[in-house]
Image (spheres, helix red, strand yellow):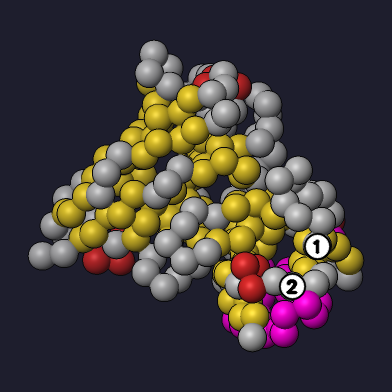
């Protein structure tokens, strides 16, 4: 069965960067886009961007352009999300979510990671 | 940027029907998706492509999309359905989520 296992919680200071990983198993890693979605405390879901694990191409929500980097390691079936210049507004739970389209993104998600808490505080 | 609007809260009595709406410009021309999120858990897809239900989702969940409003309907609502529900669409550049609706079963 499909499993997405994320790395553990992080505590960062303002201005720092954070890198969160999402290890996939149970399917052909390069066949499905991976997305990142975050949720601030008590708030709704916010889409951040996506990566095509096959070629590594990425696309980001305008809000995160220039501050968000998505990479993948096909040897370990892992996607990494790195965000720089953190502020307290970036305190949130970060989820990876697998796209349901095969080779072509369909932009909806039936498999989610467990979430990673990122806290930004001085 | 594209926006989806949901009511912040909906209340329903056990066994009754709950309707949660999601409105957006030209939403009828896109697919709507719905997720259930219980406290402290990851979201779960309950409806995809307007009306389709994943095999693991109970038949009491259904969806529709017309008149630029997508609707998630739960017939015979159970206490276990109490959760936050989010609609979602793709506007060709970004995935967009509605603000979420808290469903209370009382």
Q: Which residue is drawn at 68% across and 32% down?
A: A101
Whole-percent x, y for residue A119 in the image: 23, 59
Residue A57 appearing in the image: no
Quarter holding the N terminus of chain B?
bottom right
Residue B100 percent location from the top left of the image? 59, 71
- Residue A68 appearing in the image: yes
In terms of depth relative to the viewer, which is nearer, B60 or A64?
Answer: B60
Q: Nearer the viewer, residue B28 or B61?
A: B61
- Specify which label sits upstream in the sequence, 1 or 2: 1
- Residue A78 in the image: above or below residue A86: above
Asked whether, in this view, residue B39 is left or right of residue B26, the answer is: left
Asked if disc 1 and disc 2 are in contact, CB closer than 8 Å, the reply is yes
Q: Mark 2 points at which residue?
A: B77
Marks 1 and 2, how far apart at CA: 8 Å
- The part of the chain drawn in magenta is B4-28
Quarter where residue A20 is shown = top left
Residue at 62% x, 43% y is A110
Q: On the image, which quarter does residue B33 sit in?
A: bottom right
Label 1 is found on which chain of the structure? Answer: B
- From the image, tell me which residue sits under label 1: B60
- The image shows residue B93 at horizontal and vertical percentages of 62, 48
């Amino acid at each position: 069965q499909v499993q997405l296992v994320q790395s553990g919680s992080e505590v960062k200071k303002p201005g720092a960067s954070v890198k969160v990983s999402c290890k996939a198993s149970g399917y052909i890693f390069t066949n499905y886009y991976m997305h990142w979605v975050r949720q601030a405390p008590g708030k709704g879901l916010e889409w951040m961007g996506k990566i095509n694990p096959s070629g590594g191409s990425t696309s980001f929500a305008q809000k995160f352009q220039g501050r968000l980097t998505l990479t993948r390691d096909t040897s370990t079936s892992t996607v990494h999300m790195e965000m720089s210049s953190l502020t307290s507004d970036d305190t949130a739970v970060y989820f990876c979510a697998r796209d349901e389209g095969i080779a072509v993104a369909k932009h909806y998600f039936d498999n989610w990671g467990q979430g990673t808490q990122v806290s930004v505080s001085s | 940027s594209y926006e989806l609007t949901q009511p912040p809260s909906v209340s329903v009595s056990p066994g009754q029907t709950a309707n949660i709406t999601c409105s957006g410009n030209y939403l009828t021309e896109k697919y709507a998706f719905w997720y259930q999120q219980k406290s402290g858990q990851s979201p779960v897809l309950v409806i995809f492509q307007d009306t389709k239900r994943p095999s693991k989702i109970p038949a009491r969940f259904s969806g529709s999309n017309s008149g630029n409003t997508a609707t998630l309907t739960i017939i015979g609502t159970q206490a276990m359905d109490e959760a936050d529900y989010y609609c979602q669409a793709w506007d060709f550049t970004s995935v967009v989520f509605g603000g979420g609706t808290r469903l209370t079963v009382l």
